[in-house]
Image: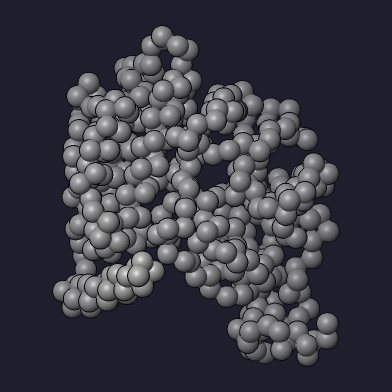
Amino acid sequence: MSSQDERKRLPSHAFLDEESKGRYAELERRGVYALAPKERFWQQRYRSLKDHGYLLRPRYSPDWKPSWSGTNYNPDFCEDSIMLTIYQVMDATRISTNEQVAIKSFNRRGQEMHVARFLGNITDPQNHTVPIIEVFPDPFDSQLAMMVMPYLRPCNDPPFATIGDVVEFVDQVVDGMVFMHRNNVAHRDMAVPNIMMDARPLYPHGHHPVRLGYTPDTLYPATALPRAGRGVKYYFIDFGLAQHFPKGASSLVVGDVGRDDAVPELSDTVPYDAFKVDIFTLGHLFATEFQEKYKNVDFLLPLIEPMTQRRPELRPTADQVLRKWTEQRATLNETFLRWRLAPRDEQPLSRVVNDTVAVAWEGVYRLKKFVRES
């Protein structure tokens, strides 16, 4: 393709003017876009992973040369300028299926591989633990292994928009907790970053795996479709702290660990019940992610209040949480589920406008339903 054809194909913001060109050239000389030391870990494994069936992005090829070098391309809109943000996990393409996957490097001596494989091998509609495609030894370090999983996106990006979005999320994560506990596994870190979603129904044309708000080529903003009715599935990830207890064994553990530092009983010396920690952290997630942010999710309070009791023995079991949620969910009607989430910090004028739009969309929905049924 000639440079003239390339200019016609790419948007104007992908190119630098003469003044900016010198500034970006200086940034490149300083190494701003060079591989970070921890990225070299993945570059070293590029060929081994390719031989194993997984292709990393061009940035991690041992033969990589920046695509913008010697051109007037803006590096910020060149896909191979984008650095990893979580160095332990790398996105890749599974060559046999052309599907996007995530490859996690982890220490083989912990429980993570055992727990992930154990749960992943159980077929159950309540199973919301991330599927494991395969696990294989690290090609250079005998202490490490590689775990391949489907590529997933943070559960709250894009933000939840309707009551129904929240209800569907609660449905799935409560089911997922019940599944783990019934199989004698405590996750021990049920924080928002450890619940992700298969967002392919929301982004039918894909998005970049690191710069999430952009298209795969990073040239344009990526716009998400609404969650409602698209079958988004949520998954628990990261079993680095998880514990699989033998049947009948004590569930007491120690360790001041996990992302949620609000759990009152965490201790390095005093044993506590790992299952009750899961109950608290999931209840606290419902509180901080929904109840504290939005005005119209008070239907979650009958779950949140018992789940976040300071005394662990006063908290319900996972099965009791599910029973309570089933009762509570039955009180929510279909129209309410379609209603937008109302932020607590929303200004009065914005609220009037947004409510008016929501009413209009509800009218459109009812009209379409009437037409379909008549």
Q: Position of residue 308 (x, y in %)?
A: 23, 35
Asked if residue 283 lies left or right of residue 23, the reply is: left
Residue 194 vertical placement versus 356 (above, below): above
Where residue 162 sits: x, y (%)?
Answer: 31, 60
**Residue 262 in sight in this render:** no
345 over 282 or under it: above or below: below
Q: Position of residue 27 (x, y in %)?
A: 65, 72
Residue 323 placement, left or right of 7: left
Q: Image quadrant of residue 312?
A: top left
Res. 137 visible in picture: yes
Residue farthest toward the front in the current orientation of the protein: 374
Q: Nearer the viewer, residue 361 or 226?
A: 361
* 253 shown above or below 143: above
Name the residue nearer the viewer: 202 or 216: 202
- Residue in view at x 47 percent, y 52 percent: 232
Q: Residue furthest left?
A: 348
Residue in the image at 33% along x and 20% along y: 273
State the residue at coordinates (19%, 43%): 301
